[in-house]
Image (spheres, rainbow, N blue to C red):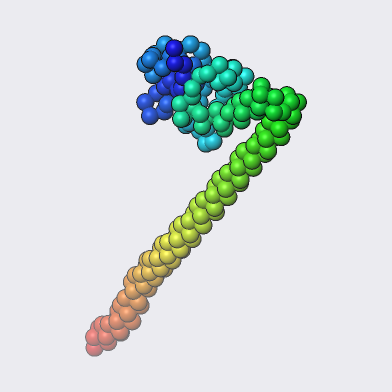
Amino acid sequence: MAVKIRLARRGRKKQPIYDVVVADARAPRDGKFIEKLGSFNPNHHPPLVDIDRDGALKWLLDGAVPTETAKKILSEQGVMYKKHLQVGVNKGAITQEDADKKFDAWWSEKEAKVQGAADSLAKTQAAEKKAKLEAEAKISAARAEEIAKKNIVVEEAEAVEAAEAEGGEEAAEEAPAAEATEEAPAAEAEAPAEEEKKAE
């Protein structure tokens, strides 16, 4: 029986999550499997991988053949390198202690690279967020200036209208007073004329 290590799909539409399983090569992709080794979620950056490394190594040493995608995932997790070292130990090329030291050194270097990549990604995201916030602040400041200018223009227009309205009222008040003063001297001039006529 040909045994493969491969991915079985699950999850929602356009948001797949894969299980890393050991299955018969003749079984359907999402069908019956022998053992589940872990999961792989490509929807995150970097992708989330949770695999039983010892179980995967045992199956690889027993002759299970990984698919290309499963092989990449196992290689990223160090299972393929561990298998390579274990084959050397089985053949007597190196000791188990040397193999473990080599793997630990490789794994610590790998974790440092992953952590550095995650830190640089976080820094770039923070810089992008800061730039967006600064751009939004500039836009809002420009909008506030425009609104302030419009308010000043409106206030000036209202002040001019109020001044014109006050000037019109004062002119209206002065005009009746002037008419009254003009009528008063005319009446006084008529009064002496009437007195003269009576005297005659």
Pick the front one: 115 or 7 = 7
Residue 103 drawn above or below residue 150:
above
Query: Residue at position x 44%, y 16% from top?
Result: 2
Left or right? Give the position of 143 relative to 46: left
Query: Residue at position x 46%, y 63% from top?
Result: 149
Query: Residue at position x 48%, y 59% from top?
Result: 142
Pick the front one: 38 or 136 = 38
Residue 112 drawn above or below residue 14:
below
Pick the front one: 186 or 48 = 48
Left or right? Give the position of 15 relative to 109: left
- Give the x, y percent position of residue 76: 57, 32
Query: Residue at position x 64%, y 40% from top?
Result: 113
Q: Quadrant of the C terminus?
A: bottom left
Residue 97 drawn above or below residue 194:
above
Q: Quadrant of residue 57?
A: top right
Q: Quadrant of residue 78?
A: top right
- Give the x, y percent position of residue 190: 27, 82
Whether residue 195 is visible here, answered yes or no, is no
- Give the x, y percent position of residue 1: 44, 12
